[in-house]
Amino acid sequence: MGSSSRIFEYFVVCGLGPEIRALDGAKGFHGVEEMYMPAFLDQFPPSNHALYPPPPPQLPTCVLPAGVRIYSSGLDTDDISTYPRSYPIVLTEGDGSKIYVSCIAFRDPICEDIIEAYQIPANSFADKCICLVSHSPSFQVLRDALEEIFVLCFSPAGCSKPLWDTISHMVSHVTLPTPGKNRVLFSIENCLLSAEAPPKEWLPHADISFQPLVQCLDVDKLILLFTAVLLERRILLRSNKYTLLTLVSEAICHLIYPIRWQHVYIPIIFSSGVDYIDAPTPYMMGLHSGVDTSAVTMDGVVVVDLEYNRITTSEEIPPIPETEHSFLRGEILKLLQPNVVGIDFMKVNLGSMGDYSLRSGTKSWGQEHDFQLRLIFLRFFAQILSGYRNFIDTTSTTGFNSQAFLKKRSRATNQPVESMSMIMQFIETQGFLDYLERCNSAEENANNLLDKLQDATGRGQNPLSIFPSEVADPEIITIADPKTDGSEPGNRHCYKRFPASARTEEQEEKRKSILAIASGASKQVPSSPSIRVHGGPKAESLSPRERAERERMVLDIKVKLQGLWLRLLRLGATEDPLSSFEYGTILALIESDAEGIGGSGFVECIREHIHSGWQCRLTDEQFIAVKELLKMAITLANSRNDLATIRDALEVAAEMYRKDPNNVQDYVQRHLLSLSVWEELRFWDFYFEYLMENCSNKSTNYVTLVTAQLIVMATHMAGLGLPDIDSWNMIEKIAERNNLGYKQLIKLRALLTHLQQLRIGYWGVATGKSQPLQSYGMASPLAIDVSDESQQPAEASGLGRSWVHSMFSRDRSLRASSFNRANDTNAVATTGKTDISAAQKKTQTNMRTLRGHTCAITALHCVTRKEVWDLVGDREDAGFFISGSTDCTVKIWDPSLRGSELRATLKGHTRAIRTISSDRGKIVSGADDQSVIVWDKQTFKLLEELKGHEAPVSSVRMLSGERVLTASHDGTVKMWDVRTDTCVATVGRCQSAVLCMEYDDSTGILAAAGRDVMAHVWDIRSSKQMFKLQGHTKWIRSMRMNGETIITGSDDWTARVWSLNRGTCDAVLACHAGPILCVEYSPSDKGIITGSSDGLIRFWENEGGIKCVKNLTLHTASVLSISAGDHWLGIGAADNSMSLFHRPQERFGGFSNAGPKAAGWQLYRTPQKTAAVVRCIASDLDRKRICSGGRNGLLRLWDATTSI
């Protein structure tokens, strides 16, 4: 059962562990007056469980915020200070999700082995805390279950089975209730407990009482606190009760619904974290009132004293507008003091005039009061945001036309805009902007209670009408209590202390080792508060207080970095990470920290994210941002001689990918070559020692062990793009130092040379360093001139993919297998040299390499016969290929001119070209510089530059009548008149970036789709939108329109067939195991062909229901292009493989067999592929040519009509 389906995710015990450390960082026992750091003691599921991630590492510090105290006695019934304490806490993860924890802290006897090792007084007690951890906000269920476990443990009658058996059954089997549908019943010994959640149509689940909030603060203070939270000020709650801090924090977060608190949220902060109060960013934190804050600057902090009903701040909080303030204050008073507010009213039934909020006024506080209080604040939002939906503007940077909204409110209330400072500040908060973004999702719109309330109010309905009526009793789900195995009916388990769970042999050995070291230290050094036993590399240079301060600083920066990192990854498609607040703050933390905590913390943050399951995929913009941040972290670490941070950055950089629209990946590591540290032997010496110390299999033969670690280093050197001679000099020195033999040196030299050649074949010559094309010393295992891509054998492609995969992998065994494969390839290359040469000679006649671009090819277009045909016949430019590149140029190629194919180079763009189209007289190109350029096809001159898009241009299309159709990442589709250089109209508008577009010039039907997961269809002649085709759940990458049918391919692994007559989905094609990157309609058999990142090509028959009739596995990488004609079919993939299919013409007798039509496609020819990564492919089916554009800037033209 996955953790997401369980209500209890962890049971954790925290307290005094075997490694005792004081709060100031000093190791060992220093007397009972000292406070000690809490640690993890036990947990279920265990820490070595493969299916569940570990609990938050900060959990012990948060559940025992004051630390662990040692006592001479335990529970004393006459002393209330010794009683167990039960309280909830809430933790916020880096992605903003909350973890809810119920805690019971109590005094428990210290284990005898710890007492003996540290010479602690006998029969001593220490603070211990048991916790239930959940992602469900079921505070009451968590508390009830935990208290039953605690009572059962210390019950004189004992329990019927071991306590940890009861705990494991409860955590493993009690499921989350389905909101509004069922109630889960479970038992702990003889106590029956239940859990349920309200329907999704109700207010968000809040299993707390709001009474503590209204009891601690009067109405005016409550409204002031609400305003400060709404305006995202720095909020500090103070109380001497932990429970109160958590309940008030959670209550105020629920009262600002539908807004969500977007900033730091720590309801209970540990006492040593007082310096967090100086943080400049908004936060909401709770601090025990016993903690001294006199040394902390409180400028701008809103301090809420819950014990004395007091709020202080040095900054003015703008008041809520008078109308809404009067409503809010009056309604809260009606709820809290109904007898006073309604003292003048007659006690008669006035029907609909009766105030529904008074129905619960005379009762003691309960769930009805909680609901009424939340409804009052929701009604407040309905008033203050009246009509806000009319001012949502997806084209603006904020998504909201705030000026128009304020002007409309000013006219409605007869108040000047200048007097609305509170509203002006509110609509600029991150919480309000986040709400606007959520309004765009279908699920949020369906359950948007604010919109429903505004609609109900406008119709004069009771606000309660927005909630579903009473439903039938929920279904009861009973969790059966397991039978007691191996225990007699009368056998009971009694405990004098909270028992420890069973430890593994490894855990037991580790515990004994720690205690043995502690025992030796305690015998050498007197156990005195004035004498400390220090540890760690910086122990001699830092005092205990300085070490404690440094540890707090590290934790503070790490928590900030985690949140900033995850927010950086969540930036929208139109947001620039390099100019974002998140990027600037991370950069400042890295640069401003002289000790390197920011840099090392940022690298560690990425590594933890990778280990938690992140796939390391980055957009182009995020890729650049991360690359620059890592460069800065490495540069500063090098200046401090912090080789550990450089090592970690090197490893995470190899694992972080960029994924472009064609699924061709880049990785961060190869962009770090310009840093000088890689040329220094001291770093590689350090890295080698680290690899040797952390090798998992140290029992292996020493020579094999050294060789394996040098292989890892070689992959990193090749990944960085270090010159071959520099890499080999450093590896050779380290190998000789470790007495590596000649045979191993030969293998290492062969591997390194081969990896360097493969890298050049993939990425080209590295920039920023001198990179020789020929190897030094020993010859390459494959003696091939890599400067000519067409001369590389097919085997290099498979080995290259293995090398790339192994280089990015954390599994060293995979890297070793890549080394073995290199040796195998060496043997093949040696023995089969004649065959390879023959094959190369054979392919020279039908494969050409076109050189001209200096950077990756990003767009490729074939001038088809249909585009340029006129009454005279074919134009001479039919069959030309037009390419665009990240070198910002467009090039025109004539395949008929062997040896001089390049006809012209067009310069005008300033960023990468993404799309190209043409007609009889013009070429049009769109680029990342947000511009569209129209060129004259005969003179190659720039005719017009069309500017109007606000984001990169993704698609262009030349139309009849001197018109151009363009689509962009800004979500718009525009039509331009080339003759006047003007935008005729914005003919279509999507909610996010447009990735693909189709247009039928004969009917005027336009279809576009992209990141908003919908296909939009417009009739541009009548200027209206026909349909929004909804069904896909992820980005739509490809689209084809044929007559009344549209075919779409999506990242959700499906293709869909839509009817333009009905606007409905006729079929879902779901047989691929990856995103569908290209779809095509086959005119000869009316079938459908789909290609995916899984490398498969699937043929679908469209008669009597769509079904897959044929699968092809010719390609081993993403299929990028499918082009179908009447009798020819061209396909290309990212692994630089191509294939051409032929369909025999029908004869008068029809088909010779009764098989499916799609199966009639027959493989005609496929060329030998080479080691290159392809980004785009275009096919000229009339002349049986296919052209591919590679990341290395080369075009590979295959002429299938040339005899093989």
Image (cartoon, rainbow, N blue to C red):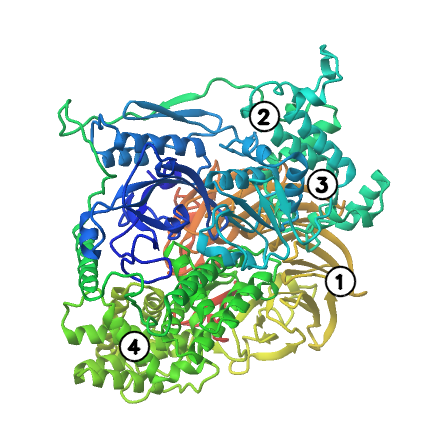
Which is nearer the eye, 791 or 425? 425
Q: Nearer the viewer, residue 717 or 367?
A: 367
Q: CA distance from mark 3 to mark 4?
A: 68 Å
Instruction: Say the numbered circle drawn on residue 836.
Output: 4
Q: Residue at x 54, y 39 (%)?
A: 248
Q: Position of residue 720 (x, y in %)?
A: 40, 76
Residue at the spot of label 1: 962
Residue 227: horizontal and vertical position, in percent?
Answer: 67, 43
Mark 2 against mark 1, which lies toward the viewer?
A: 2
Mark nearer the viewer, 2 or 4: 2
Residue occupying image coordinates x 56% and y 21%: 364
* SS state under label 4: helix
Answer with left or right where residue 968 lies relative to residue 561. Answer: right
Amino acid at the residue labelled 4: Ile
Q: Which element carries disc 3, helix, strand or loop?
A: helix
In the rendered structure, which disc, 2 or 4, sits on the residue that comes first in sequence?
2
Q: CA distance from mark 3 to mark 2?
A: 30 Å
Circle 3 residue: 389
Question: In the image, which disc is placed on residue 369?
Answer: 2
